[in-house]
Amino acid sequence: MSEEHEEKVEREGLQMSFLDHLDELRRRLIRSVLAIAVAFAICYGFSDNIYNFLAVPVQKQLVKARLARQAAIGSPDWSQLKEGQEAHYTLTQDTSINKTPIPVGTTITIKGVRAPDGKVIPALAHIWLVGKTALAADTPLREFLNTGESAALVGENDQLVITTVGGAFSLYMQVALYAAVAFAIPFLFYQIWAFISPGLYKHEKRYIAPVLVSATVFFILGAAFAYKVVFPATCDFLLGMQEGFHTLITANDYFDLIIMIMLGLGIVFQIPTIAFLLARIGLVTPHMLWRVWRHAVIVIAILAAVLTPTPDAFTMLVFAAPMLGLYFLSIGIVWLFGKPRRSDAEVTALAHGK
């Protein structure tokens, strides 16, 4: 068989009709939906754990804001308390005793007792019954307040709010669905690649492993960066502007916000992967990317404004900063892995091993 005939057979084998493309797309979509369905069934069983994990950043910021407000109240001057003298003491921080919450503002009767070091310290004036726990008289306040305050870091006012009867059920369904999509992303990336790979040359198909690994790793890095850095900073900034208000955050609104931020940054962190792929094909060069970096800054600012789920400029800047860093990282990736663009004849020869 002549080389011309072999080339013709291979070219015809790679060609697919429009209906063949539709059938292939249907198969890939069905596999993707089945993968998400299986992941959803698994994630739904852990939806409360997943949501509690996602709720940690906002609860930390709510606790931080509350403790800052309580710290501004200050501590009493215990030097005014004399030995044996009774007084009323109002708690300035939330605490707990054996997991029983004691809210800020609770007033107890105390008295001054002489400590071993000779100082007069506050202690309970009477037996204090808290649930099944009985604290004896003369128990120093510091013995249970310090431990209780650390155990009661997340108080009632730091919990997220559900406003409908079926709110928790629908929320857990959403949590399970988004978590299923996140866990299925490597498989979904593979399905996308498998759909477009028949139209690629043999040497281009070798990029599947690095592209899939890079896309998955950078998506995880983007979501982790959003969870650990971007969202806490955004919360700290936005909650700091709510001084003088009693903040009640609905669970659904919070979940939509953190998912948008995590997914948005997961997508943004694909910039190096896209740069790697374009560099291997020969469509971009380091000189090209460096020459247009000023234009890239403007585009990044516009994209950050579009992707940012909140209207404040601070969150937009927090989005734009990693995008700008990833752009310059991409220049290095293109410099390391880039290849010169080949002519059609060179690509055809390479595809057939010539």
Image (cartoon, rainbow, N blue to C red):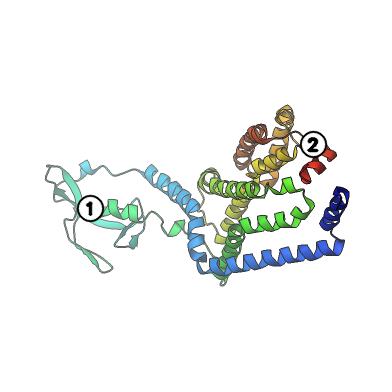
Residue at image location 77% in from the left, 50% down from the top: 200
Asked where in the image residue 237 lies, by quadrant, the reply is top right
Residue 148: x and y in percent read: 30, 55
* Position of 250 relative to 201 (above/below): below
Q: Quadrant of the C terminus?
A: top right
Give the residue number, with chain letter if any, for mark 1: 143
Q: Marks 1 and 2: in contact by CB < 8 Å?
A: no
2 vs 1, front mark: 2
Of the image marks 2 and 1, the number of the one nearer the N terminus: 1
Q: Amino acid at mark 2?
A: Arg
CA–CA distance in space, label 2 to label 1: 76 Å
Give the residue number, with chain letter if any, for mark 2: 342
Residue 40: x and y in percent read: 59, 67
Q: Secondary structure at mark 2?
A: loop
Q: Is residue 36 left or right of residue 27?
A: left
Residue 81: x and y in percent read: 20, 46
Disc 2 packing (10 Å; few <14; some 14–19; many ≥20): few
* Position of 170 relative to 2 (above/below): below
Residue 348: x and y in percent read: 82, 43
Residue at image location 49% in from the left, 51% down from the top: 57
Residue at image location 69% in from the left, 38% down from the top: 300
| Furthest-bottom residue in this view | 165
Can residue 89 be seen in the rendering of this structure? no
Residue at image location 59% in from the left, 62% down from the top: 180
Q: Amino acid at mark 1?
A: Glu
Q: Secondary structure at mark 1?
A: helix
